[in-house]
Image (cartoon, helix red, strand yellow):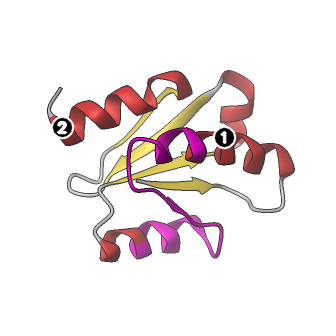
Amino acid sequence: VAVLPLMKNKENIVELARGLYQNLSYRHNCFWDVSGAIGRRYRRMDEAGTPFCVTVDFQSLEDETITIRNRDTMDQIRMPITEVAAYIDKEVNGY
């Protein structure tokens, strides 16, 4: 799982993303990536075989939701931050 704050120079976005990264890293192998454009980060994670990318953006600050991108289907869905760990558990482990 890669956690990608949309902008590395926006402290509140980085702080929210860092908290999510720490939470997810207890359960899964996680990557933290803040370098380059978001599209390049997605491609970099695709090449590394990372199944999910979680993006924290400006909307995340407003409503505490994130975008999660599936590497295999390229689908992107918006979900509450509180549901991310359970969603990844279900997708990876089947339950």
Check residue 68 for magenta coloring: no
39 sits left or right of 33 in the view: left
32 sits left or right of 48 in the view: right
Write down the region rendered in magenta: 22-44
Q: Residue at x 29, y 56 (%)?
A: 51
- Residue 83 in percent (x, y) is at 44, 23
On screen, residue 5 above or below 65: below
Q: Secondary structure at mark 2?
A: helix
Check residue 33 for magenta coloring: yes
Which disc is residue 19 wearing?
1
**Hey, which residue is sitting farthest front in the picture?**
26
**Hey, which residue is sitting farthest left in the picture?**
94
Residue with the mark numbered 2: 93
Q: Secondary structure at mark 1?
A: helix
- Residue 40 in percent (x, y) is at 50, 74
11 sits left or right of 16 in the view: right
- Residue 36 in percent (x, y) is at 63, 76
Disc 2 residue crowd, few under 14, some 14–19, many 20+, Cα 10 Å: few
Q: Give the position of the C terminus as an image quadrant.
A: top left
Q: Residue at x 33, y 37 (%)?
A: 88
